[in-house]
Amino acid sequence: MTSEKVPDAAGVRQPSATDQKSRSHKKLTVSLESARSGLAMVLHCQGRIIFRNEARELATIVAQVLPTSGRMVVDLAGVDSVDKGGLGELVLTQLWAEASGYVLTFACPKKSVRHLFEITNVASVFDVYPSVAEAMLAMAVRDASHA
C-alpha cells in the first residue's frame, strides 16, 4: 500500500490517512523556560525545522523573546530534521541576533542535525554546544571576560 493521494468521488485528490498521520506527527513544537539565575531563556524545540511555518514560527518566537532577555539557548535535542529552508531561517535569525547585540546559541543537536551544520559550514556561524548547561556556562564565561 502506498501513501499516494487518493481521488474522492468528485475527482479531487485527498491525502490518505498515512499522509495525514505523518504530517501531524512531525510538526515543530516549542516551549520556553527561564533558566536559573536569569542568565538566559531556553527555547526547547521538538519535531522538525522545515521551510515555511515551522521555521518561521521558530524565528518569530526568537525575535519576540530575545530582545527581553538578551540571551537565548535554542535546545535542539528534540529536533529530528532540518531542511534547507529551516537552515536558512536559522542562519538569518543568528545573523539578526548578532547584529542586534544579542547572544543566541544552540545546544544538543542530534548527530544528523550537527552533520548538516558541518557539511553546510554553518557550524562556523553558530555557537553550538553539546548541552544546554555547557551553553549557559559559555555565556557566563563570556560575561565574566567582558566585565
Image: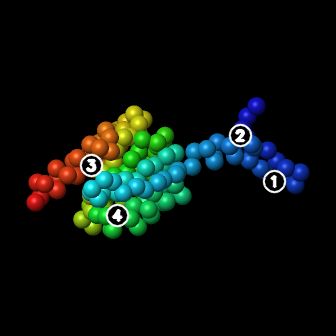
Q: Is residue 21 left or right of residue 77?
A: right
User: Mark 4 against mark 3, which lies toward the viewer?
Assistant: 3
> At 36% from the left edge and 40% from the top edge, which residue is drawn?
108
> At 39% from the left edge and 47% from the top edge, which residue is drawn?
75
Q: Is residue 142 left or right of residue 59?
A: left
Q: Which residue is mark 4?
A: 66
| Mark 2 element type | helix
Gap in Å between the C-alphas at discs 4 and 1? 44 Å
**Which amino acid type corresponds to the residue marked 4 in the rendered image?**
Leu
Gap in Å between the C-alphas at discs 2 and 1? 17 Å
Question: In the rendered structure, which disc, 4 or 2, sits on the residue that comes first in sequence?
Answer: 2
Gap in Å between the C-alphas at discs 4 and 2? 38 Å
Gap in Å between the C-alphas at discs 2 and 3? 41 Å
Q: Which residue is mark 2?
A: 18
**Front in this rendered view, residue 111 or 141:** 141
Q: Position of residue 125 (x, y in %)?
A: 28, 50
Q: Do tag 1 and tag 3 residues touch (Cβ < 8 Å)?
A: no
User: Mark 4 against mark 2, which lies toward the viewer?
Assistant: 4
Q: Do tag 4 and tag 2 residues touch (Cβ < 8 Å)?
A: no
Question: In the rendered structure, which disc, 2 or 3, sits on the residue that comes first in sequence?
Answer: 2
**Front in this rendered view, residue 7 or 82:** 82
Q: Which residue is mark 3?
A: 136
> At 33% from the left edge and 68% from the top edge, which residue is drawn?
68
**Front in this rendered view, residue 100 or 2:** 100
Q: Position of residue 87 (x, y in %)?
A: 41, 50
In this rendering, does residue 99 appear at all? no
Farthest residue in the right direction? 9
**Which amino acid type corresponds to the residue marked 3 in the rendered image?**
Met
